[in-house]
Amino acid sequence: MYLVVFLFKFLFNVGKPIFISIKRAWATIIFRQTYKFIPKPVKRYFQKYPSITIVTGSTKNHYASALPFIISVAENLPNCNLIFYNLDTAHIPTTIKQVCALFGYSFKTFDFSKHPNWFSIESQLNQNTDRFYAGAYSWKPNIIHYELQNATCDYLIWCDAGNQISVSFEKKKLLNANEAPQTFYELIAQGPVTAFTTWHTIKKLTHQDTVSKLQGEPYLDDEMKMGGCIVLETKNELVHDLITEWKNSCNDPDLVAPRGATILNHRYDQAIFSILFYKYADKYGWTKHLGNPKAHITIHHDNNLVRVYGKCHYSNI
């Protein structure tokens, strides 16, 4: 009798975890087989992704690349909002405006009349020796600052219109053999400010007057930050302080475009942002050097368009 009870308890204690494991395995198999048939809109409703707004803008010379960028956002990040700024006072991109309306995106025109004349993009766009090349790009921090102040999302992302989103939230892709897979969300959520680096140093592409006024000498050998993709935590007050300081600095013509500065030796708003970013990173312990975004975001995808079409200069798009 005791032997029977012992055997029963032994089999129960050993068999129970085995039974549970088998049950869980079957449940997982059934779930995976049925999950793929659930419509994507239903999946996205229950998946708790952060709310994201992407801000972009272009003049007529980038309309041809802005359109596929907007479509790439709609295809890969369907839960994201997008705000497009028309930076050309003489043209209205009808097709882009219609596409924005189709996807429920916002279409705005930057009001250059509220800013100094040197903000103008078109008059200096192709003059590499001009001090205020492309308006010293000062319109960019002003747009980002305004949208950040009025943001209701979790993350605000500035993307140049020549970029392209290549991987969705659901997909994962190896950045390289030594890095773990990252989703788009994991890539952007690397700190209060996610800004990727270029292959140039601040010393190489920043005018000395700008370095001196910003006390950026400790960061001369650090890599310049990309201006083509900047991710911001909207609910972080330090981020607001950084962007406000960036905007105010870029509104000072002697700071953003000191005499002797050209696009060949100075990167205007990008140079100022890089120095300020490293100063804030040192002071508040932010991550300085981040993963390569190319697994998810193609920066300056418009370079491919230029090689194919010669010019991205279609004002009727």
Image: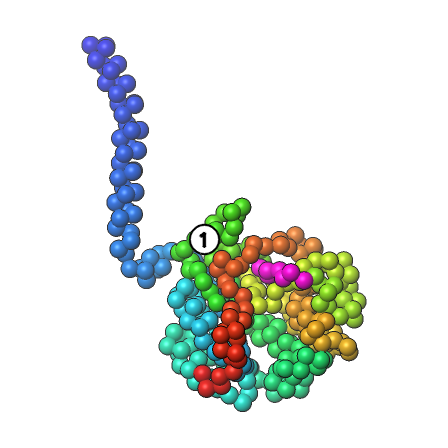
Residue 196 covered by magenta stretch: yes
Q: Position of residue 137 (x, y in %)?
A: 63, 76
What colour-coding does the image apply?
rainbow
* Magenta span of residues: 193-200
Residue 197, image quadrant? bottom right
Residue at x-position 39% and y-position 75%: 104
Q: Position of residue 109 (x, y in %)?
A: 52, 83
**265 or 192: nearer the eye?**
265
Residue at x-position 23% and y-position 10%: 3
Q: Which quadrant of the figure contains the N terminus?
A: top left
Q: Which quadrant of the figure contains the C terminus?
A: bottom left
Residue 279, image quadrant? bottom right
Relative to 96, 263 lies left or right = right
Q: Position of residue 110 (x, y in %)?
A: 55, 82
Relative to 108, 287 lies left or right = right
**176 or 67: nearer the eye?**
176
In this rendering, the answer to whether 43 lies above or below 111 is: above
Residue at x-position 52% and y-position 75%: 306
Residue 278 covered by magenta stretch: no
Q: Residues within 10 Å of mark 1 (few under 14, many from 20)?
A: few
By secondary structure, the bulk of the magenta-drawn segment is best described as: strand
The residue pinned by badge 1 equals 173
The amino acid type of the residue labelled 1 equals Lys
Q: Position of residue 203 (x, y in %)?
A: 74, 63
Residue 146, image quadrant? bottom right
In this rendering, the answer to whether 59 lies above or below 5 is: below
